[in-house]
Amino acid sequence: MDLRTRAETAVKDACEAIRATLSEEETRKVSDVIERAIIDAVRESSQRSSSAAALCCSADQDMAHKIAEEIERANVALIANLSSMR
């Protein structure tokens, strides 16, 4: 399931939970907000992972740097893929 579909499903589920009906424009706007929140959460998680790698490998800073770079590359690729699914 792509990011846009997940966001739209979240909007639908939220509307059902509170018995609300949104217009197409309102649904799009709320989906955009949810999509942005997911992207921000992925970025934050990646930064925490990079920081953890640096802390865990403090004795070997070169290894920590390589792990952090790999996590960052994977995060950039993920964000690009998620953003292209809009």
Image (spheres, rainbow, N blue to C red):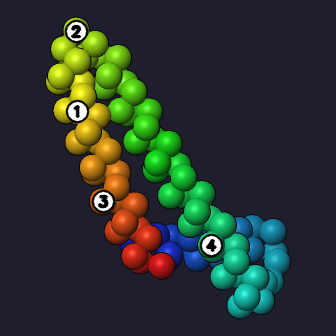
* Point 73% across, 88% down: residue: 25
Which residue matches tag 1? Answer: 67
Sequence-first tag of 3 and 1? 1
Residue 13 shows up from this direction: no
Sequence-first tag of 2 and 4? 4
Point out the image quarter for the N terminus: bottom left
- Relative height, residue 54 to residue 6 (above, below): above
Instruction: Calculate the distance from the C-alpha at mark 2 to the C-alpha at mark 4.
Output: 42 Å
Kind of residue sitting beneath label 1: Ile
Instruction: Calculate the distance from the C-alpha at mark 2 to the C-alpha at mark 3.
Output: 29 Å
Kind of residue sitting beneath label 3: Ala
Mark 3 Cα-neighbour bin, 10 Å: few <14, some 14–19, many ≥20: few
- Label 4 or label 1, whichever lies nearer to me, is 1
- Label 2 or label 4, whichever lies nearer to me, is 2
Which residue matches tag 4? Answer: 32
Mark 1 Cα-neighbour bin, 10 Å: few <14, some 14–19, many ≥20: some
Label 3–label 1 contact, CB within 8 A? no
Instruction: Calculate the distance from the C-alpha at mark 2 to the C-alpha at mark 1.
Output: 14 Å
Which residue matches tag 2? Answer: 59
The image shows residue 82 at horizontal and vertical percentages of: 41, 68
Q: Disc number at residue 77? A: 3
Disc 2 is placed on an element classified as loop
Instruction: Calculate the distance from the C-alpha at mark 3 to the C-alpha at mark 4.
Output: 20 Å
Q: Is residue 15 left or right of residue 74?
A: right
Residue at the far bottom: name it: 24
- Label 3 or label 4, whichever lies nearer to me, is 3
The image shows residue 83 at horizontal and vertical percentages of: 44, 70
Residue 68 shows up from this direction: yes
- Relative height, residue 73 to residue 63 (above, below): below
Kind of residue sitting beneath label 4: Asp
